[in-house]
Image: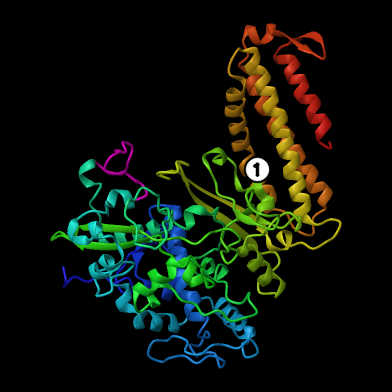
Amino acid sequence: MSNQVFNLVTDPWIKVIDKATNQDKEVSLTELFENAQHYSRLAGEMRSQDLAILRFLLAILTTVYSRFDADGMGYDWLEIDTETLKIINSVDEDDYEQDDLQKTWQQLFQQGHFSKIVIQYLKRYQKRFDLFGEQPFYQVTADEYDAVVPERKKVATGSGTVSVKQINRLISESNHTPDIFTPKTDGEKNHVSLDELVRWLIMYQNFTGVTDKTKVDTNEKFSTPSGWLYKLNPVFANGATLFETLMLNLILFTKKEYVTQKPVWEYEDLQDYVANRKKLILPDDLAGLYTTWSRLLHIEWDEQSQPTIFSAGLPMFSNKNAFIEPMTTWKPDSQGGAEDFKPAVKSTRSLGIAMWRNFGQYVNVDKSISHEPGIVTWLHILEKKGMLVPNKQLNLSTAVLVSDGNATSQAPIAEIADDLVVKAEVLFDTKETQRWPERIENIIDLTQQIGKDYWQFVANVGQIRNLDSRQFASEYSAKFYDRLNEPFKQWLAGLSNDDNRDEKELEWQRTLRKIVLRSAEELMNSSTSRDIRGITTVRKGKSVIQNIFTSNNNLRYNLKRHLNL
């Protein structure tokens, strides 16, 4: 296999949607950065895969444009090696000109395409992007692998491998637990094309479970970690084109001090990377964070270009207070101090909860109790500096791969993709008494109160029918919120700072009341003689008849009590 070449810089492997044809196509890194403005979005096998690849692309852009301006000239206050394109001087805080990075971002955004310096950088590191190279892409050599794993796990033993069907997150099947409902037949599960393998490699490093038994040798024991993205509740900005999406997520000038970017391919010796990871130090640069490996991988190839993948777990730094990570929501750490936060990871219990219902996690409605995602803070900086038009629609999106919650496997069981569209002027409204974010949060609280009222109504009906009332109510409640999702998102996207805010709130309350009553009516229409006859219950020491009509009356009373109509 030594003569084979598959280079990410020149060979097509990234799936995108072409704006002109609305069809998907595969492009190389060179094509992507030259034509990102002509593509709608990434279009891989999964939305969470697209997110992993988006971060990989951002690592390249962050590295390049933190060293070179839009015209390809190195910043005056940097000394850059013309051969490696790396920084060779430490940057004093007094010398660092943050405005230069702002000008670069602004110039790129205004011209609507990336500049040639990105392609020049990729050509310089082209050897590191070859799947079969001397230093193969996102892998280590056999000697490098053997140097850090136990004797019994070395490549020659053939142990410590992970199959293609495990790396393919549409299957995620181990050799011991067959997955029946997969997009491939048994005979094809371990067959993969080179372009698809690259996409899964990048995703697997970000969304790894914990079934692997092999780990790198360390002085202190450590648990095999899951992938970094797997431990977040992701949030990122979506633009009208792939270029705009990349730009809106390209965080260049938020820190007062200069941070040198170091993606994993810039390590000349990957033993240094492993040694660095053993220190459990959180990266201080985004390129390093976005290209964080959870596994040390080595691939052996057969004559049909099919891989045998050796995998060893790497120690992973903690995500507590890891605010360098911009693409997650946060929640207070229940096991930490008052100032400690951890990513608000989505679990099986929160699968059906849409983004808008957690609006306060995405926007600092009350700064004393929440921590805003870094990407939202970044968009706010762009808005304050006048680099986004006020009425621009901002699309905050998520792509979540949810694990089974099993500590010994963390196998993916569901993927959720959702979004939240709101105008920049609304999201970052600063009016003191009429401030939109606070009013939106209050409206959501009210909506969820009405959701509880509806849940109680259905639970009462379930009790009358002698069913498991909690399960019965939860099923109907999920359908109710499904009905709310689109109308609420449309209402939210339509808000502006010129609105009569009281009237807009009433508009939503009217819509909400209509949806609740329609949902209740459907349940009423399916009533049986038992529902009409009802049951006898005790309330406040008195026996009362509870039937579907009294339950409906209680719901209407609660609507009148809670809604301001």
x%, y% of residue 359? 67, 50
The correct choice, above or below, for 9 with respect to 453 in the image is below
| Residue visible at 61% across and 48% down in the picture | 355
Density class for disc 1 (Cα within 10 Å; few <14, some 14-19, many ≥20) is: some
Residue 114 visible from this viewpoint = no
Q: What element does badge 1 sit on?
A: helix
Magenta-tinted stretch: 168-185
| Residue visible at 78% across and 53% down in the picture | 438
The correct choice, above or below, for 466 with respect to 30 in the image is above
x%, y% of residue 48? 45, 54
Residue for badge 1: 487
Give residue 484's quadrant in the image: top right
* Front in this rendered view, residue 94 or 379: 94
Residue 171 colored in magenta in the image: yes
* Front in this rendered view, residue 293 or 11: 293
The correct choice, above or below, for 209 with respect to 394 in the image is above
**Is residue 393 rendered to the left or right of residue 430?**
left
Residue 117 visible from this viewpoint = yes
The image quadrant where one finds the C terminus is top right
